[in-house]
Amino acid sequence: MVMYASERVRSIVSMNPAGRVTVPAEVRRELDLGEEAFFEVQVQKGAIVLRPVAVVPLDRAKGYQGNHRRT
């Protein structure tokens, strides 16, 4: 078992020369991510943190409350 910041590492992934990283299928299922997802990217304490975000087209944004899920 590999430990990092008191949490077990679930997967090790690689980055290709274009900077692309594949999110493992298990993680995509757990987070209920569709075929296309958008993420906020932050660096925190030397780690890359990806947080799923909802991107709403401006023409549909009026009244958006943030609790809608893609189906």
Image (spheres, rainbow, N blue to C red):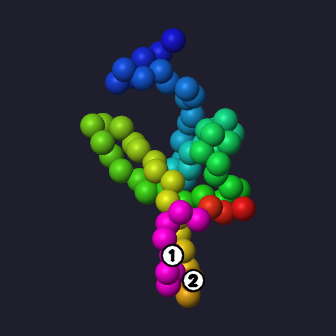
Residue 34, magenta (yes or no):
no
Depth check, mark 1 against mark 2: the one in front is 1
* Res. 61 in view: yes
Residue 4, quarter of picture: top left
Q: Secondary structure at mark 1?
A: loop
Q: Residues within 10 Å of mark 1 (few under 14, many from 20)?
A: few
- Residue corresponding to mark 1: 64
Vertical side of 44 occupied by 33: above or below: below
- Residue corresponding to mark 2: 60
Marks 1/2 in contact by CB < 8 Å: the verdict is yes
* Amino acid type, callout 1: Tyr
Tell me the number on the disc at residue 18: none
Residue 64, magenta (yes or no):
yes
Q: Nearer the viewer, residue 19 or 52?
A: 52
Is most of the magenta stretch helix, strand or loop?
loop
In this rendering, position of residue 7 left or right of residue 29: left
